[in-house]
């Protein structure tokens, strides 16, 4: 199983937040759940619960409201992608990071469409997983670009972006906030919001995650 390298992450690591990340682990294998817990808890991550089925995941997520759900796609009772969609429908603010052994581009595409903030492969290193959690926590997205390029191979007509809008898209894809982008470009936050909204409209993207996916598709991160 391949691991997520620093070059394949779509977003750079933000400054660590002093408040522990609240995570729910969803996987049907107890040993996998225990392994993930042992990776995360010593680093200060608050594993608020575990679930071995989709129904348990939905019930526990509703009760405990974790910031991030680490979600395997193979569950004994429900399709993992259906669980993803139901999690996002119940609470949009809950981020979902898919962690799976499947490197099928079709699954990546469906996970993105379902609202996943990231897609990493089992075998990911501890440091890489912690970095991915921090990125997702701060509204960024973490995908393997090689999987995304394969999953988004069908061209889609879109209005051409200006050079400024392409620069904006690159910065969005690295996980920077509007304020950080404003500092980088020496703009006001209001100007950043204006250009970001225009860029999202041209791409037909609903949010930053979809915009970051489009940045990979267009080869803007290479």
Image: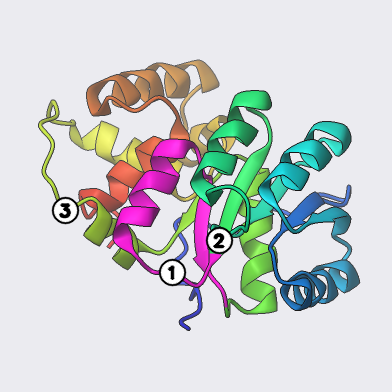
Q: Is residue 63 magenta?
A: no
Dot 3, crowdedness within 10 Å: few (<14), some or many (≥20)? few
Which residue is label 3 attached to? 153
Q: Are marks 2 and 1 in contact (CB under 8 Å)?
A: yes
Q: Position of residue 98 (x, y in %)?
A: 56, 56
Q: Is residue 105 magenta?
A: yes
Of 168 and 213, the residue lying toward us: 213
Say left or right for 220 vs 207. Answer: left
Which residue is pictured at 82% across the width and 69% down the height? 37
Which residue is label 1 attached to? 102
Range drawn in magenta: 100-122
Q: Name the N-terminal-most of marks 2 and 1.
A: 2
Tell me the element at label 1.
loop
Which residue is pictured at 52% across the width and 40% down the height? 82
Dot 1, crowdedness within 10 Å: few (<14), some or many (≥20)? some
Q: Is residue 41 above or below residue 160?
A: below
Of 180 and 65, the residue lying toward us: 65
Q: Quadrant of residue 131?
A: bottom right
Q: Is residue 170 visible?
A: no
Which residue is pictured at 80% across the width and 32% down the height? 62
Q: Is residue 120 above or below residue 1?
A: above
Q: Is residue 207 above or below residue 50?
A: above
Q: Position of residue 53 (x, y in %)?
A: 71, 53
Q: Is residue 112 visible?
A: yes
Tell me the element at label 3.
loop
Which residue is label 2 attached to? 74
Say left or right for 210 vs 47. Answer: left
Q: Name the image quarter holding the C terminus.
A: bottom left
Q: CA distance from mark 2 to mark 3?
A: 25 Å
Q: Position of residue 156 (x, y in %)?
A: 13, 36
Of 164 and 154, the residue lying toward us: 154
Q: Position of residue 51 (x, y in %)?
A: 78, 55
């Amino acid at each position: 199983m391949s691991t997520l390298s620093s070059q394949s992450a779509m977003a750079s690591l933000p400054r660590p937040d002093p408040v522990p990340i609240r995570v729910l682990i969803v996987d049907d294998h107890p040993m996998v759940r225990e392994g993930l817990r042992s990776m995360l808890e010593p680093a200060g991550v608050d594993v608020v619960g575990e679930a071995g089925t989709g129904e348990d995941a939905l019930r526990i997520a509703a009760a405990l409201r974790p910031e991030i759900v680490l979600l395997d796609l193979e569950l004994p009772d429900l399709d993992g992608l259906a669980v993803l969609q139901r999690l996002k429908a119940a609470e949009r603010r809950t981020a979902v990071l898919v962690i799976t052994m499947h490197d099928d581009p079709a699954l990546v595409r469906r996970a993105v469409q379902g609202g996943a903030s990231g897609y990493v492969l089992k075998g990911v290193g501890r440091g890489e997983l912690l970095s991915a959690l921090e990125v997702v926590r701060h509204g960024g997205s973490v995908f393997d670009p090689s999987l995304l390029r394969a999953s988004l191979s069908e061209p889609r007509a879109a209005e051409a972006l200006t050079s400024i809008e392409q620069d904006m898209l690159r910065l969005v894809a690295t996980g920077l906030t509007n304020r950080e982008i404003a500092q980088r470009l020496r703009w006001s936050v209001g100007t950043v919001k204006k250009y970001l909204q225009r860029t999202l409209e041209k791409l037909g993207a609903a949010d930053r995650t979809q915009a970051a996916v489009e940045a990979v598709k267009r080869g803007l991160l290479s």
